[in-house]
Amino acid sequence: MGNSIQIRPIGFVINDRKTPEDYCWGEVVSEIKLVDLFSVECLDGIENFSHLEIIFHFHLLKDEDVVFDLRHPRNNKQYPLTGIFAQRGRARPNKLGATIVELVKREGRSLFVKGLDAIDGTPVVDIKPVMKEFLPRDAVKQPEWSTDLMKNYWK
């Protein structure tokens, strides 16, 4: 795959979800606790944002389960064969996930967020504040199968 990079966790997820599931993430409240390398000051000002984008690593995904080409989303043959980069499944080549969450509160070096679809112990590799200028400026277009796939994801 070419050049390699090294990414270290900046923190870890703490919550009650122990296994990856494809539904009911909307009400999950998670703590993201920074590793000792980072001082409390690195979060100063973050409480002025309502939402954060969390980049995390699917640490339990086995290398042999990674998809490099086509698959049916969620392995459901009712959905079309789709390239891995045209879906948001966790079986990705670099095993990275990204989710926009609501910031509930900050306590020292911990952030409490709502709607993070990452299980307990998940390594967090980056946190970014959500700014409306980085969100889509036009209507979002997506295929019908993706709307169907996501109907119970946040409930």
Image (cartoon, rainbow, N blue to C red):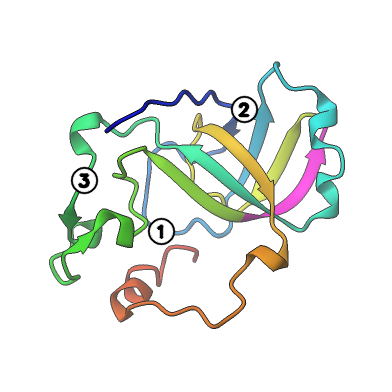
Q: Report the magenta stretch's main SS.
A: strand
Secondary structure type for disc 3:
loop
Image vertical order of residue 73 relative to residue 34, above or below: below
Under mark 3, the amino acid is: Phe
Tell me which amino acid carries mark 2: Ile
Callout 1, which amino acid?
Tyr
Residues at discs 3 and 1 in contact (Cβ within 8 Å): no
Q: Circle 2 sits on which residue?
A: 10
Q: Is residue 136 visible?
A: yes
Q: Quadrant of the N terminus?
A: top left
Q: Is residue 126 above or below residue 35?
A: below
Residue at the (62%, 67%) spot, across then down:
135
> Quick check: 110 left or right of 54?
right
Find residue 152 and report its image quarter.
Answer: bottom left
Cα distance in 3D space between marks 2 and 3: 27 Å
Q: Which residues are magenta?
A: 101-108
Q: Nearer the viewer, mark 2 or mark 3?
A: 3
Q: Position of residue 143 (x, y in %)?
A: 33, 78
Decide whether residue 104 is among the magenta residues. yes
> According to the image, label 1 marks what residue?
23
Q: As drawn, is 48 to the left or to the right of 120?
A: right
What residue appears at the point 65 percent right and 37 percent down from the top-left corner?
31
Q: Residue at x 70, y 17 (%)?
A: 37
Element type at mark 2: loop
Residue 141 position within the rendered picture, expressed as x and y whole percent measured from the top left: 43, 80
Residue 105 appears left or right of 91:
right
Q: Could you give the CA–CA distance between mark 1 and mark 2, rounded to whole angstroms?
A: 26 Å
Q: Which residue is mark 3?
A: 68
Label 3 crowd bin: few (<14), some (14–19), many (20+), radius 10 Å: few
